[in-house]
Amino acid sequence: MPEPSPPTLPRRTLLTWAAMLPLASLASPEHSRPDVLFQRIDLIAEGLIPGAASTSPGLQLQQRLSTGWLGVDLNALASITAHFAHLTPSTPSDITPNALNEVVAELDRACFTEELGTEAKQQWATVKMAVLSIYFASQQGAAQHLRYAAVPGRWLPDIPQQQATPYLSNDWLAMWFS
């Protein structure tokens, strides 16, 4: 009895599959699509600072990604924003502030208890830093939200603050960045 020949793939089928190969790279999960990522960055910003989404931090971050600013890349954004996947980015007005706060608090807890690992902790801290930097560099964040308390000639490390006191800024921050 002759040995059976190995299974063969018809040439037409092989060429069809090869032609479809580039399409496989387009089939990515929704949470890694750039438009969804940057909408979720706006949600993260809103969860960190109420009202911050109005400054479009997602769009600002998208413009800065090509420069490698803060080492943020699409992979880091995709892994962090995946935690916000259950929030619907197309209807941010329907998302309650409590829901945003819960997601941000849960992600903080998971990252800082090493539940998600060191890389996730670094990525989350970088995304938060990027969102805060973008917001406080905007007109709304810098001119309306920050309270400037410059004390000429001396440095006061402990400025009294009440519960409703807005974020503080002083010339030491400018010195650090210059």
Image: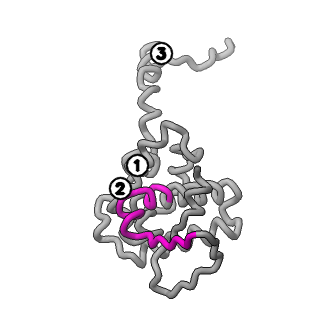
Of labels 3 and 1, earlier in sequence is 3
Q: Amino acid at mark 1?
A: Gln
Between disc 2 and disc 3, the foreground one is 2
Where residue 68 sits, quadrant-wise, is top right
Residue 140 in magenta stretch: yes
User: Residue at the location (37% across, 47% down)?
Assistant: 35
Question: Label 2 to label 3, Cα distance in Å?
Answer: 52 Å
**In the structure shown, which secondary structural element does the residue marked by tag 3 occupy?**
loop
Q: Amino acid at mark 3?
A: Pro
- Mark 3 lies on residue: 10
Up-down: is 110 above or below 26?
Answer: below
- Mark 1 lies on residue: 60
State the extent of the magenta-drawn residues as a range: 133-152
| Residue 136 visible in the picture | yes
**In the structure shown, which secondary structural element does the residue marked by tag 2 occupy?**
loop
Quarter occupied by the N terminus = top right
